[in-house]
Image (cartoon, helix red, strand yellow):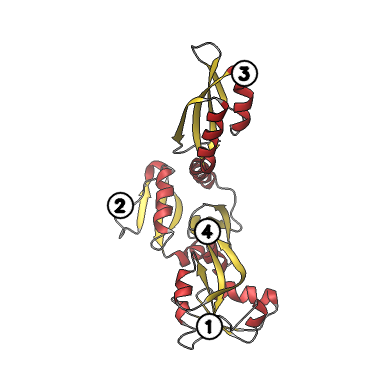
Amino acid sequence: MLRVAIPNKGSLSEPAVTMLREAGYRQRRDPRELVLADPDNDVEFFFLRPRDISTYVATGTLEVGITGRDLLLDGQAGATEVLALGFGGSTFRYAAVPGTAATLDDLDGKRIATSFEGLVRRDLASRGIDAEVIHLDGAVETAVRLGVADIVADVVSTGTTLRQAGLELLGDPILHSEAVLIGRDDADTDPRVEHLLRRLNGVIIARQYVIMDYDCRVEDLDAACAITPGLESPTVSPLHENGWVAVRAMVEQEHAHATMDRLWELGARGIFVTDILACRL
């Protein structure tokens, strides 16, 4: 069986389970369940601490896993990103009390508290900055107020928690993170992993696109197809009423309403949008 690691808790856990379920895999219903076999798909899922997943994959204990890019890069070497999954987006940033640091150069000689010691040390080294890195397991935003550190480096989604702690973001993001599928650096091509990748890619694309159906006059068809070119080209079928055709095409979901407006102005009618649950392209 293909062995796959999934976060057992945290912000990535439920979206990962949802994506795998949409990809056709059995998923747990009891959050206390730590191992789940899916014999129909020849897969076994292990629900593990997100920070540990890169270690299990790097050592070859498990073939692949889902974790955050930040956790992957902060963790043990030997695992690599295979596929970005499009959820769990965040940035990794420095933050300081307003007025205490203006640029990243001001980090020199400071104490920096973080839960991502590996990431921070590598970033400081790449900038030639000499600073003391203090490892904390969580809630680093209180470290400055408690006098443990001068600066913090942490995962930022909205920045609200840092602002509530009296801190402001400093410099550009160290890293843009999201959920990723990871594998071992030196792993041979595995047909089981390729099968998983096809399914996950099918879900990712399905979430980005919708199917748009509409009717238009034959003389407007070229203009309509220019608005909805699809991935390759639209499907066009003649209608019973002479001079009209039915058109079907994949359209980016975020532009669906604007596309419908343009088609309506062109004279298209009977415009419908349908969600895509999964696909293979």
State whether residue 76 appears in this view: no
Q: Which residue is mark 1?
A: 134
* Spatial CA span between label 3 and label 4: 46 Å
Q: Could you say where residue 222 lies in the image, as x and y percent from the top left?
A: 64, 24
| Marks 3, 1: nearer the viewer | 3
The residue lying at 45 percent from left, 64 percent from top is: 50
Q: Quadrant of the C terminus?
A: top right
* Spatial CA span between label 4 and label 2: 25 Å
- First in sequence: mark 3 vs mark 2: 2
Q: Which residue is mark 2?
A: 29
In the figure, 68 relative to 36: above or below?
below
Q: Which residue is mark 4?
A: 178
The residue lying at 57 percent from left, 53 percent from top is: 82
* Spatial CA span between label 3 and label 1: 69 Å
Q: Which residue is mark 3?
A: 219
The residue lying at 60 percent from left, 67 percent from top is: 173
The amino acid at mark 2 is: Arg
The residue lying at 31 percent from left, 58 percent from top is: 31
Q: Are marks 1 and 2 in contact (CB under 8 Å)?
A: no
In the figure, 241 relative to 197: above or below?
above
State whether residue 145 appears in this view: yes
- First in sequence: mark 3 vs mark 4: 4
Front one among 34 and 201: 201
Q: Residue furthest front?
A: 265
Element under disc 2: loop
Q: Could you say where residue 113 lies in the image, as x and y percent from the top left?
A: 52, 80
Element under disc 1: strand
Element under disc 3: helix
- First in sequence: mark 3 vs mark 1: 1
The amino acid at mark 1 is: Ile
The amino acid at mark 4 is: Glu
